[in-house]
Amino acid sequence: MSETALVTGPTAGIGQAFAQQLAARGYDLVLVARDEERLEKTAAELRAAHGVEVEVLSADLTDRDDMARVEARLADEARPVDLLVNNAGFGLKERFLDNPADVETAMLDILVTAVLRLSHAALGPMAERGHGGIINVSSVAAFLPRGTYSAAKAWVNSFSEWAANEYRPRGVTVMALCPGFTKTEFHARMDVGRDSAPGFMWLDADKLVATALSDFDKGRIYSIPSPQYKAIATAARLVPNSVLQRFQSMGRK
Ligand SMILES: NC(=O)c1ccc[n+]([C@@H]2O[C@H](COP(=O)([O-])OP(=O)(O)OC[C@H]3O[C@@H](n4cnc5c(N)ncnc54)[C@H](OP(=O)(O)O)[C@@H]3O)[C@@H](O)[C@H]2O)c1
């Protein structure tokens, strides 16, 4: 019987690459995002290209009632989910004090609360069955002082590392994927141009996800695709935060 993966944010960018590559591996899919028309279009393309079963679940992951429907789907013992990809997310262009607190809270809800609640819903049944996996899409920003987005992604890294060690003995693999700048809709949604970071810094979502899935197959706790971002993650541990903070406007213009 085929395995099932639930992917949040599968209609664009990194999540779309996950949905395509998981379907190519034979996974049936549950797709979660807000725009129902786009979800149905993505589902139809995946069914046609890969012959897999695709369910769509329209939900805004900053809304607690919508989130509850996704949690219920993950906890449904009759239709087990073998792999959860917590990918949906957005960033904010403005500095902390220039954003209303509610906007900051919505970002925290999707980057942290959704990862916590969906992992909580999925991990119980996975640990019970002794089989499953979770990929949390974090960011290289987790290693850098870049405001509340970095702080949220640092939570994702810390949580993923802990959960990976906690649940590995129970058959569940957990990995944090830390992309650098990747060509998706993320920056356009923030109203930020591609010229906000040098060309060599931009990654391709398909290659990024191929590396991530290969790292996941190897049981790695972290996946940091591409040499330049591996170097940044290493350097960030050695350079004082006060120096790193000077680069925080990169990717926000
Ligand atoms: N691109 C980068 O440079 C980069 C770098 C490091 C980390 N990341 C991380 O990678 C992940 C994916 O980003 P991406 O670059 O692929 O973004 P993207 O191209 O903008 O795609 C975002 C996806 O998330 C969904 N989404 C957005 N808000 C949502 C909400 N409130 N509820 C449910 N779904 C929602 C979108 O669909 P709807 O709009 O229809 O809901 C879409 O499918 C994020 O966690 C991001 O923080 C990105």
Image (spheres, grey):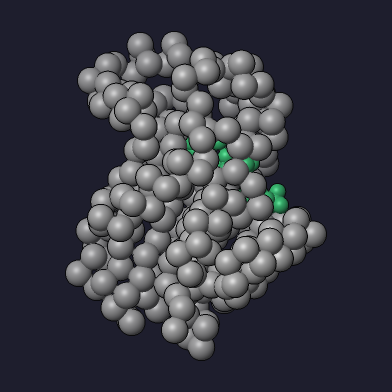
Spot the residue most to the right. Answer: 37
* Rendering coords of residue 152 (x, y %): 47, 40
* Rendering coords of residue 198 (x, y %): 51, 15
Q: Is residue 69 above or below residue 205?
A: below
- Where's the C terminus, which quadrant? top right
The residue shown at (40%, 61%) is 134
Q: Quadrant of residue 178?
A: top left
The residue shown at (67%, 41%) is 102
Total numbered circles: 0
* Rendering coords of residue 68 (x, y %): 61, 70
Image position of 175 (left or right of 20): left
Viewer-proximal residue among 228 and 129: 228
Q: Is residue 72 above or below residue 65?
A: below
The residue shown at (61%, 55%) is 10
Q: Is residue 74 visible?
A: yes
Q: Is residue 237 above or below residue 1?
A: above
In the image, ligand 1 is in what quadrant? top right
Image position of 80 (left or right of 242): right
Spot the residue most to the bottom. Answer: 78
Viewer-proximal residue among 122 and 81: 81
Image position of 97 (left or right of 123): right
Q: Is residue 27 above or below residue 16?
A: below
Viewer-proximal residue among 161 and 100: 161
